[in-house]
Image (cartoon, rainbow, N blue to C red):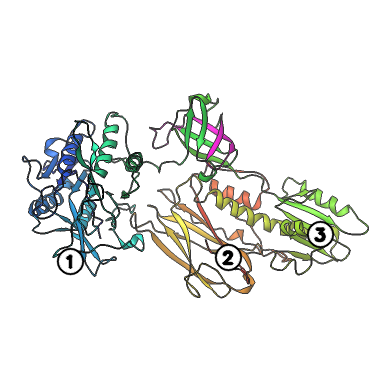
Amino acid sequence: MIRLVLISCVLWIAISQQANAARHALLIGCSDYKTQGDLHGSGVDVALLNETLATPRFGFGPDNLTVLSDADPTTKPPTYDNIHAAFETVVAADWAADTDSDVLLIYMSGHGGQRSCETENDGMDEFFMPVDETDVILDDQIGDWLSELDRKGIHTWIIFDSCFSGTMTRGVNPNETVRGIAPASEKLRKPILPKSNKDVGWELPMSGDDGRSNVVAFYACQAYEQAIEDRTLDKSDGEPVPHGLFTYCLLQCLEQHRADRDAKLSYEELRRGIIERYRALGRTWPTPFCEGNLTQEVLGFERWPQAAALRVENIDGNVSVAGGQLAGLTPNAILAVYVPKDRKQESPIGYLKVTQVTATTGEVESVSYADIGEPVQLSRFPNNATCRVVSQEIGELRVALTLHDLRGNRDDSFLSVLREKASDPLSIFRVNPTNGTQGWSLFIDDTERLLVPNSVALTIGDRMPTAKELQREPSVRYPSTLAIRELADAVERDLRRVYSCQNLQRLAAAYGPSGSTTHDIKLKVTKVNGDTSSDEIRAGDVLRVEVVNEGAYDASFAVFFISSRYRITSQMSDSIKPAQGVTRPTTLPLFEMTINERMWGQNGLVLVGIPHEGRVKHQLNYSGLDQQKLGDPVDKKRGFTPVTPFEQQLFQATFGNEKFRTGGANQEPQMSIISWMVSENAPAELP
């Protein structure tokens, strides 16, 4: 169903029958209704939008603008027949004869309403009311028209500035009018708040091999809110001029951008600009809503990467990066910097290295990197320049080991063997003289050899842990008959298992949702039995595991299970189709897993996903990462041949021994991890 939130400026679908026309607009503004309250801002907004589109910045000629406004006697009135005929003309036009792709703007401003409909998810049909009130334009009909336009490859931007609140009232503020229809013979009723996003609105029609829609929709408010017409926004001529709140802010953004003909605006930037103007006006409602490919150029064809969360702040020569830890920044990360107009982020003007980082800010220094031989003067980085993480240091990967020798006759020979192993350039552990909060401890007395996490060691001091203290804790007890080197080899084997699991999780965090890349490929875990109203995980629960692709490209993926005993099991590798639309992700069921008593502690699933994006498809086969749990005397034969730069990073994280950086991969990985705790006393929640 369609969220008919309509704007008080009749946008455009001016249809030119000339085959070579590339821009069309249809602007519909309803003001003087037969029985419903009049709207005084719709005609004003349509006229202003018409003027804006006719400027050289947007290039709509008179033959490319079709206006239906009862406030303008030179145009046809927006009656049901005229609106229906205008849409049919647009859809039936010989678009295929055009030499270039066509852009279509549709703007609808007037009263909207809802009526009962059992076939809709929220039990309501949305509609737009023409001025003659002889019939209504249903959301389903608009959806059919948009689907046909999308099938023809027309890039359509449709704007709605009205509401379906089920009432037509004057607000508490006498300067405001709500754009909605009162309940009458249409059996209209007030909508309730939706239970989910799927309960309201309409799905964008999709087409094309990449699964993208050519439709972008802007709504003045959510389907359960009221769109506002305000008389206090514009007093430029001394007298208050009524405007639709949403349309007024939209036109301000377009006017601001119109002055710079070289600057290009994306739909996402336009959306943000509208929200900023709402805030400046002190508005917390209604809530503008946009959907579609917002990375595309407004009334154009270019598409840019999603706007980066990281931006340069240059205040009087003091340069920092806005974003910080919340945007995935870590110390020593390298950022490529681009001027604000470089939306495709193709030509970096320099590189910054993060020296210190807080939750929201990163302190930086200019560095040479890649093709920038000399560091750029820090003060020359412009304010609001965008940044992209090109290299991120994961940090020290080796596992810290502390030895607790509790024997009466202390012998340093074992410590010497451990230090010898740790000094090897290929070693995956280092010996610490004292316990840290992270790492592992090896306790040795006259009869036992025990490997435990430092979290246990820190609570007990220099004594052997008891069986009760080790309950539900990962630990390994080695036979006392092992010779010194045999014991060292066994400890190293188990620390390698810890190393692989921990660094696989760290890599997942670096390439996870808080990282620098778009995150379209995700894991979804749902509890399907037991108390499904609770997120607590208990023994006996069954979890359904799915992969979701919200992106526009096919993707390869691999899923691993990591147990609380540091076992890695490759669950499956496969590929997934792209999303069917902006609001219709592709979901691929993988498997169901039953939680048993042996799965105490923290367990998790790790996803590696790589979108193809036109590159050669690369099947992911990481079964060589599989390993046995802690304490198993015999390990599987492990290893795989890394092909891509990312796989080299993955190999280094699980088999290597040194610091490494993310970045430089020609296939941008997307990773995620979902973990849960199984405890007999206090089960934790599934994220």
- How many marks are shown on the rendered structure? 3
- Circle 3 is placed at which residue position? 443
Q: Nearer the viewer, mark 3 or mark 2?
A: 2
Residue 562 visible to the viewer: no
The residue under label 1 is which amino acid type? Answer: Lys
Mark 1: secondary structure: loop
- Magenta residues, start to end: 338-367
The residue identified by callout 1 is 187
Q: Quadrant of residue 468?
A: bottom right
**Residue occupied by mark 2:** 684
Secondary structure type for disc 3: strand
Badge 1 density bin: few <14, some 14–19, many ≥20, Cα 10 Å? few
| Relative side of 537 to 500, left or right | left
Residue 255, given in percent of the width and then of the height, sits at 26, 33
Tell me the CA gap for discs 3 and 2: 30 Å
Rendered image quadrant of residue 143: bottom left
Question: Looking at the image, which is closer to me, 227 or 106?
Answer: 227
Camera-side mark, 3 or 1? 1
